[in-house]
Image (tube, rainbow, N blue to C red):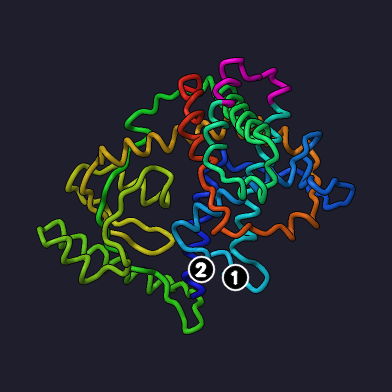
């Protein structure tokens, strides 16, 4: 059961986290009183209402519930933490980032145009018609302006992001993003005792392992099946790896990337032991193209993060701890709304993609 919870938690946090523009440092948190009954937290001069936070949390939670079932939110991650607690933290982080970016947008004089505000109103109206009267009442939605506000602030954050990364070069070469595929045989230079502690072999034992690796490499060069040699000698659970630069240990990568297809590298030493590496493919086209996307996202996030993190570190964040810790999800049989962000993504999400390239 614990393993199942950990898997679900990991999946939930990954899905939640991709909703945010990037992982950023948090501002100083001060748990305090002095809030109104409908105020959840404050970032700098920006305040977030409990209605906003509940809309974020409910829509995120209902998306997971549709997949894993409503019992998901009663599971305990550990003695004091439920999965709901963890997802609540993600909703807080996401909404906090939007509020902070609203303040940062003022610094750069980034505002929404009349056409963009009109698109916000249209998208908000589309979401509102998905809600029942009971959902509006239980979520505290007294008028549609709160949805327009959420969409407007989220779109402003997207526009600011596009503005800050506008000079990022979208071109990434095959060489920079290249993914190769190799097979390898590992002979470990350490043992693990009954308590799970790693014990390094002494110099003499390590020398014997190296000599054995040289023998196996010679067998491969002379034509013995590399698959058979892996099966017989390798102490790694995986025989094949596809990777790019920066993914594995430098000595392994340097040797692997220097190989031509079907070539076998000299014996390589890493922290795991000695490796015999054979190149299967010098360029996996599909994986290389996917890695280009990954690298471009990383490049954009780094540029954005340099500005955002410096700004947000100066902000003080105050949380209404009493409200946040006691916040519960409404009964999903009555409130099953999960379209807040899917409608945003379909109507507004790609509006600034061209500007960001």
Magenta segment's dominant SS is helix
Nearest the eye: 66 or 200: 66
Is 251 drawn above or below residue 120 in the view shown? below
At which x and y percent is residue 157? 62, 30
Front residue of this view, candidates 33 and 122: 122
Tally of numbered discs: 2
Residue labelled with disc 2? 5
Q: Who's the residue at 63% across and 35% down the image?
A: 147
Position of residue 41 relative to residue 128, above or below, is below
The stretch of residues the image draws in magenta is 105-121
Label 2 crowd (10 A; few <14 / some 14-19 / many >=20): some
Q: Are marks 1 and 2 in contact (CB under 8 Å)?
A: yes
Q: Considering only order in the chain, which callout, 2 or 1, is on the residue closer to the N terminus? A: 2
Q: Report the side of 103 relative to 75 (left or right).
A: right
| Residue 148 magenta | no
Disc ID at residue 76 = 1
Which residue sits furthest bottom?
A: 194
Q: Quadrant of residue 269?
A: bottom left
Percent x, y for residue 97?
66, 39
Side (left or right) of 357 relative to 147: left
Q: Which residue is depicted at the point 68% across and 35% down?
A: 143
- For the residue pair 253 and 103, the one nearer the viewer reads as 103
x and y, in percent, of residue 219 in the image: 15, 63
**Judging from the image, what secondary structure is the residue with disc 1 in?**
loop
Identify the residue at the far left of this view: 223
Residue at 60%, 60% (x, y): give it.
Answer: 331
Mark 1 closeness class: few <14, some 14–19, many ≥20 residues within 10 Å? some
Q: Is residue 25 left or right of residue 295?
A: right
């Amino acid at each position: 059961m614990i393993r199942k919870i950990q898997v679900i938690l990991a999946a939930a946090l990954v899905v939640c986290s991709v909703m945010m523009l990037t992982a950023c440092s948090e501002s100083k948190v001060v748990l305090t009183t002095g809030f109104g009954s409908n105020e959840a937290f404050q970032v700098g001069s920006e305040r977030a209402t409990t209605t906003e936070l509940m809309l974020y949390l409910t829509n995120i939670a209902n998306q997971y519930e549709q997949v894993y079932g409503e019992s998901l939110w009663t599971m305990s991650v550990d003695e004091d933490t439920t999965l709901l607690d963890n997802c609540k933290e993600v909703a807080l982080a996401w909404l906090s980032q939007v509020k902070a970016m609203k303040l940062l947008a003022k610094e750069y004089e980034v505002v929404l145009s009349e056409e963009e505000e009109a698109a916000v109103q249209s998208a908000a109206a589309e979401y509102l018609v998905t809600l029942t009267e009971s959902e509006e009442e239980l979520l505290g939605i007294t008028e549609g302006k709160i949805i327009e506000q959420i969409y407007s602030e989220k779109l402003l954050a997207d526009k600011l992001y596009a503005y800050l990364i506008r000079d990022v070069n979208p071109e990434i070469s095959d060489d920079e993003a290249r993914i190769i595929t190799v097979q390898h045989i590992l002979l470990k230079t350490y043992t693990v005792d009954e308590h799970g502690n790693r014990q390094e072999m002494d110099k003499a034992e390590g020398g014997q392992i190296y000599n054995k690796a040289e023998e196996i490499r010679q067998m491969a060069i002379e034509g013995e099946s590399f698959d058979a040699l892996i099966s017989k000698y390798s102490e790694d659970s995986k025989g094949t790896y596809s990777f790019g630069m920066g993914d594995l240990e430098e000595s392994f990568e340097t040797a692997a990337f220097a190989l031509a297809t079907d070539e076998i590298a000299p014996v390589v030493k890493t922290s795991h032991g000695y490796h015999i590496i054979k190149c299967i493919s010098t360029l996996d086209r599909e994986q290389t193209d996917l890695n280009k996307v990954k690298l471009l996202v990383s490049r954009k996030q780094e540029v954005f993060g340099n500005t955002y993190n410096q700004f947000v570190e100066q902000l003080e964040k105050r949380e209404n701890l009493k409200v946040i810790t006691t916040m519960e999800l409404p009964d999903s049989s009555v409130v099953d709304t999960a379209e807040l962000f899917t409608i945003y993504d379909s109507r507004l999400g790609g509006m600034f993609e061209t500007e960001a390239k």
